[in-house]
Image (cartoon, rainbow, N blue to C red):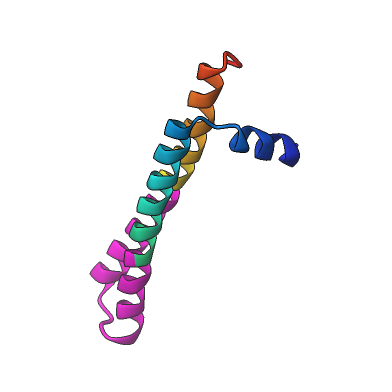
Amino acid sequence: MIKKIIEIYKGFDKITYKIMNNGLKFCLIICLVSVFILLTYNFAFQSPFIYYIGISLFRLSLIFGIEFIICGFIVEGIKKQFI
C-alpha cells in the first residue's frame, strides 16, 4: 500500500508537484510560527489568549497540510482518469 502511494507521488505532473510542495512549505511556515508563539507562551507570557492563538495556528497548519496532500492525490487521479 505504501509503495503504491510512493509510486503515485513520484509520478505527479510537475505542476501538481510544485503546487503541493509550495503548499506544504507554507504549512511548515505556519507551523513554525505557531511553535514560536507557544514557546513565547511557555517562557515569557502566561496568557491563555497567546496559548489559544498558538494552538489554533498549529491545528490550521496540520489541516492545510493534509488538505494539500489529499487534493494533490485527487487532482492527479482526475488527470490520469483514475477517479
The foreground one among 56 and 66 is: 66
Q: Is residue 69 magenta?
A: no
Residue at horizontal 28 percent and vertical 63 percent from the top: 53
Can you name the residue that lies furthest to the bottom here?
Answer: 43
Quadrant location of the C terminus? top right
The foreground one among 24 and 38 is: 24
Quadrant location of the N terminus? top right
The segment highlighted magenta reads: 33-62
Secondary structure mostly taken by the magenta-highlighted segment of the chain: helix
Quarter-of-image position of residue 16: top left
On the picture, is 47 further left or further right than 10? left
- Where is residue 36 shown, x and y percent of the image? 33, 73
On the picture, is 18 further left or further right than 13? left
Quarter-of-image position of residue 80: top right
77 up-or-down from 51: above or below: above
73 up-or-down from 65: above or below: above
- Where is residue 38 shown, x and y percent of the image? 35, 73
- Where is residue 52 shown, x and y percent of the image? 31, 64
Residue at horizontal 42 percent and vertical 40 percent from the top: 18
Residue at horizontal 24 percent and vertical 68 percent from the top: 49
62 up-or-down from 72: above or below: below
72 up-or-down from 29: above or below: above
Quarter-of-image position of residue 28: bottom left
Q: Is residue 51 magenta?
A: yes
Residue at horizontal 50 percent and vertical 39 percent from the top: 69
